Image: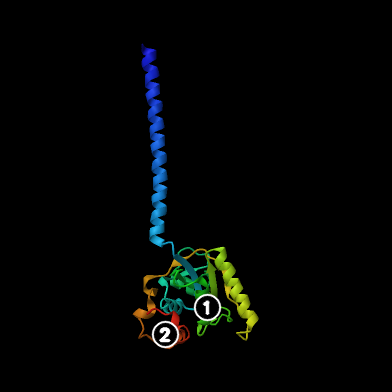
């Protein structure tokens, strides 16, 4: 009788274990699906990301945030070796980071090719480590690509511009994989729109924005 009860307990234990194992498997699978659905819902299937450095990120932000199809833009630091650098750290020129803007855009409204066109036409890509009066490795011209397609397009565009002789000097824009990106301090975000009356905004950023609006008026947000 004891043997029968013992065998019965083993059978119940096995069935219970199988049930919970199955339930856990379903839970993990469901969780995975939910996470993927959440990611898709958050980023959107039409959304993509580009990361550019073209001198001071205040200037880059002011230009690209006016493009139709750009959903959001964030100033930050990328390409360096120091973790969580501050603006003061990056300004020393010893961290290896460049001032960049991370651009979230809608691929149904604007393409990566079009973003590249704006990138190269709104700064001087032939000067090493400076734009205007902003000098240092943090101000270098750089495209941090997120995938092989972006790398291919950036390298192709760069080669075509050099071949065309559009600039008197060769393009020195760095094309590297994105790594070690960090968001800049809050006071750097949406800088031009919030500080338009300041000297740097009036005499440095405003001329860039004016030039951009003349060249790309058909691509601007209405």
User: At numbered mark 1, what does the secondary structure look like: helix, strand or loop?
Assistant: helix
User: At numbered mark 2, what does the secondary structure look like: helix, strand or loop?
Assistant: helix
At 61% from the left and 79% from the top, the residue drawn is 161
Mark 1 crowdedness (10 Å alpha carbons): few <14, some 14-19, many ≥20: some
In this figure, what is the number of numbered marks? 2
Q: Position of residue 60 (x, y in %)?
A: 46, 77
Residue annotated with mark 1: 117
Could you tell whether 185 is left or right of 170 in the image? left
Residue annotated with mark 2: 200
- CA–CA distance between discs 2 and 1? 25 Å
At 52% from the left and 78% from the top, the residue drawn is 117
Q: Earlier in the sequence, mark 2 or mark 1?
A: 1
At 50% from the left and 85% from the top, the residue drawn is 133
Mark 2 crowdedness (10 Å alpha carbons): few <14, some 14-19, many ≥20: some
The answer to whether 137 is drawn above or below residue 204 in the figure is above
Q: Position of residue 44 (x, y in %)?
A: 41, 62
The answer to whether 132 is drawn above or below residue 155 in the figure is below
Point out the residue furthest to the right here.
163
């Amino acid at each position: 009788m004891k043997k029968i009860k013992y065998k019965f307990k083993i059978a119940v234990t096995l069935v219970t274990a199988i049930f919970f194992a199955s339930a856990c498997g379903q839970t993990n699978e469901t969780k995975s699906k939910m996470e993927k659905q959440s990611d898709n819902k958050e980023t959107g299937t039409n959304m993509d990301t580009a990361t550019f450095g073209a001198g001071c990120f205040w200037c880059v932000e002011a230009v690209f945030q006016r493009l139709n199809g750009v959903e959001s833009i964030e100033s930050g630091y990328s390409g360096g070796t120091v973790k969580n650098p501050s603006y003061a750290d990056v300004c020393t020129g010893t961290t290896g980071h460049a001032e960049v803007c991370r651009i979230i855009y809608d691929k149904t409204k604007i393409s990566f090719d079009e973003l590249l066109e704006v990138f190269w036409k709104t700064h001087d890509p032939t000067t090493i480590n400076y734009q205007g009066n902003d000098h240092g490795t943090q101000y270098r011209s750089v495209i941090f690509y997120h995938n092989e397609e972006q790398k291919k397009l950036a390298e192709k565009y760069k080669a075509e511009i050099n071949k065309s002789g559009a600039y008197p000097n060769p393009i020195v824009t760095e094309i590297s994989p994105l790594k070690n990106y960090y968001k800049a301090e809050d006071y750097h975000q949406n800088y031009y729109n919030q500080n338009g009356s300041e000297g740097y905004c009036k005499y440095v950023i405003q001329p860039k924005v004016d030039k951009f609006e003349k060249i790309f008026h058909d691509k601007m947000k209405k």
